[in-house]
Each structure stands twice: as C-alpha cells, then as structure tokens.
Amino acid sequence: MKFSETEKESLKENNVQKLYVRYFDIGLHPESNFPIPISPIRFEENLKEYSIVPVVFIQNKVMLQPNLDVNDLAQKTFGFIEQINSKNKIASQEIQIDCDWTLKSKENYLKFIEVFKKLSKKKLSATIRLHQVKYFKKTKIPNVDSGVLMYYNMGSIAPDSLNSIYDKKVAERYLKSLKRYPLHLDFAFPIFSWGVHIRNNKVIGLRSKMNSRALEKDSNFEKMSPIFFRVKHSNYKNGVFYEENDLLKMEEIKPDDLKEMAEDLQDNLVEKPNEIIFYDLDEFNLNNYEKNTFKQIISCF
C-alpha cells in the first residue's frame, strides 16, 4: 500500500485523520475447506499521521461452514491483525469486521463477533447492509460498538440498464427502517465505478477501474447510449479480451448521485453519523470528482 501524490493531496485537502484499511480477506482453502487469509496488505510507507482501522472481509461461505471453529477463527484473525500492526508499528484502537452474513450464517457470525470483541478489547465496528437494517429482528444485530451502513451494491449485476452500485428506487424500500434500527450507524458512500462485461446477453465479468471517459477515447469501443458501449473490433484492454459486439455497461457514481444519497439518508436519520466514509481511496476514483465534492457531501449532515 503506497499513496500517489493525488491521493496524498486529497487526504490533506479533506482533513482526513482516519483510514479504514483492508488488511486481508478470509476465504476457504479450495481443498481442505479451512478458513485462510487471502491477499494480506503490504505497507510500503509509514502512515503514522493517520489513525488506522484494520478491516477484515470475511466471505459468507466461511460463516456457513457447519463445523466452523469460531474460537479458533477469532484467535487467528486477531493474531494476524496484531502481527501486521506490530510489523508496521501501528497501534490501532478499532477493528472493523466486514461480512454480509445471512440467516443461515448468522449464528456463527454473531458468535464470532462476541469472541473477537472479548479477545481484542478494542472498539469494534461491523459493516451493515440495507437488508440487515430492515429485517434486523431476523438477521439480528452484532454486539459491536457501531455499524457502518454500506450505502451501495444495492442490486444484482445484470445485463439490464439498472445500476447495481446505487439505485434510488431500491434504496427507498429500506430508508424508513433506519429510524427503527437500534445500533448507531455511520455511512459509507461509493466513489468507485466498473464495467459490466456482457456477451450474448450474459454477464461474463466485472471490469474494475473503468469509466465512460476512457471508453469514449478508445476507438475499439462505440457508445450506444449513456451507459452502454459496444466493442467495434476484438481487442485486449488491461489484460482482458473483448470480442467484437460484446457490450460494456458502465456503472458509475456521479457527484449528483452522492448528493442524492446524502439527502435521502439525512431525511431518515434518528441521529447524525459520527463519520462519513468514502470507498475507496484510489487515484482513478478521485479523478472523477471535483476537489470540493466530499466536503459538500459531508456538509449534508
């Protein structure tokens, strides 16, 4: 992990003091089906001027394991976080667990949170999805100090014209539930984009770090509508092969979308968020927004 000059500038301009940093994911070993850490972070610079919150994403299939040793998983997860912190001289006061748990995995997940909280003795936050807010009596509420509402990835990735990252109509089905949710929530907004790669009306992949501006300049692609591009000539782009007549559907978040999200949330709040998190910090993403965009969104609260 190393910041570009643009990223450093953006952190400074927005007076950012706290970073949520993905330390590693936890998935299942393909042969043994045991939980294993995936792509752990490597710090390439000192981040001592920031307060660092390690974030661990746990795939739901891990929590679905019927014989999961939750105590062992919690110990190993915390141990690995501590190892990374110690190696990089980071003293974190808070840890965040990211998991899209379901009704079938909630027992293991909730127990994991209990064990992890006792072990770490640190402030603990958890990511919360919209459906977990609306149906909290069924999905339950993890025993954490606060939640972060992930206000994105609302729809299914499909060849249709809907945006799976943000859809106001989908969000509206859940917003009223916020007033009944008993856990304090902070908000995470999306500032990423991707292309949905479609062949013969089937989604064959998600292409990250892609936006309309880049495709408009590429003679291999032809703009068919505000969001759809057709491949004119078979070509390779960023190591991916695009066949003639494939389609790319661009799913992007414009500043107006962010403003709309913030206003809709503001209208349905019981209490103000303590933090607004933008996901994720990346030069490619930052270049899609004016310098004052983030301050404007924060000022809505």
Image (tube, grey):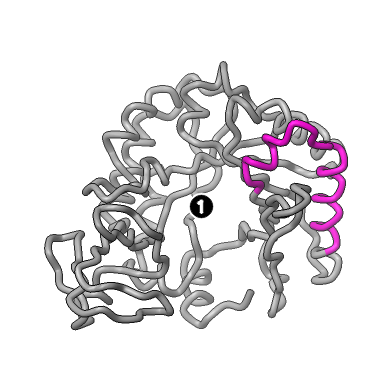
Q: Quadrant of the C terminus?
A: top left
In the image, is residue 261 above or below residue 27?
above
Q: Horizontal placement of 176 versus 77: left or right?
A: left
Give the magenta part as a residue range.
58-83
- Helix, strand or loop status at disc 1: strand
On screen, residue 43 above or below 263: below
Main SS, magenta region, reads helix
Residue 89 falls within the magenta-colored stretch: no
Judging by the rendered image, the residue that carries numbered circle 1 is: 277
Kindly indicate the quadrant of the structure image that contains residue 292: bottom left
Q: Please check the rendered image and state whether residue 81 is part of the magenta-colored stretch, yes or no.
A: yes
Locate the N terminus and report the quarter of the image it occupies.
bottom right
- 153 or 180, which lies in front? 153
Q: Is residue 175 left or right of residue 122?
A: left
- Residue that lies at the very extreme toward the top in this rendered image: 137
Q: Position of residue 86 (x, y in %)?
A: 86, 66
Residue 71, horizontal then vertical, whole percent: 86, 37
User: In the rendered structure, which amino acid carries the disc numbered 1?
Assistant: Ile
Label 1 CA crowd tier, 10 Å (few <14, some 14–19, many 20+): some
